[in-house]
Amino acid sequence: MAAKHNADPAARFCAIIVYDEEEAYRRALRTLVDLDFQVGGGIDIRPIPWRIEEFGHFYHRALAMENAQAADIIIVSVTSTVELPETLRQWLLDCVPHRHDRSTLLVVALLGGSEGMDSPESPRFQFMKKIAAEAGFDFLAPAPFGRELSAKLVDAACAR
């Protein structure tokens, strides 16, 4: 199982997908497919999936941290409406000091279920936005999906 998490350092576009349920994972993959479509195809996108519950294990958390160091984008996709789990919050906080010498990172927050995406006032939206801002990362939390998402993703891919 751990083999799926080995990031290829030569990957064209490394995307970490952190998710809570299968539906959330599929939503993140659709976001990456949209990115490839917007730039006319041909991007070598390497999604690396991490289920949030895996962050409770030291080995998985450390490996996910290693993956994040090589990432171009981190997508956090959750369908639940509860607060982000502490293990995820801590992992995001721990990613910050390890990225200061890296190129720009885009953090995408896909927060919400079938009822809709979180509003900008939600505590978890604010938490992710604050972490990204303090680290100098680009941040995007689209609601609903649209041109802003596509434009920022295209910019991230083209900068690579």
Image (cartoon, rainbow, N blue to C red):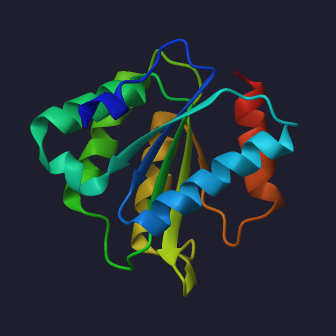
Q: Give the vertical position of 120 relative to 68 (above or below).
A: below
Q: Among all residues in the image, which is located at the extreme right?
A: 40
Q: Give the vertical position of 131 relative to 81 (above or below).
A: above
Which residue shows up at 46% across the image and 15% down it? 101
Is residue 101 at all visible to an observer of this figure? yes
Which residue shows up at 21% across the image and 49% down it? 54
Place of residue 85 in the rendered image (x, y in percent of width and height, measured from the top left):
25, 63
Q: Give the vertical position of 50 relative to 160 (above or below).
A: below
Place of residue 43 in the rendered image (x, y in percent of width and height, measured from the top left):
73, 29
Foreground residue among 65 and 46: 46
Which residue shows up at 34% across the image and 32% down it? 5
Is residue 125 at all visible to an observer of this figure? no
Foreground residue among 128 and 64: 64
As drawn, is 48 to the left or to the right of 137? left
As drawn, is 119 to the left or to the right of 7? right
Which residue shows up at 25% across the image and 33% down it? 2
As drawn, is 2 to the left or to the right of 131? left
Q: Give the vertical position of 32 relative to 79 (above or below).
A: above
Q: Among all residues in the image, which is located at the extreme bottom?
A: 115
Q: Quadrant of the C terminus?
A: top right
Q: Quadrant of the N terminus?
A: top left
Q: Quadrant of residue 97?
A: top left
User: How many tags in the picture?
Assistant: 0
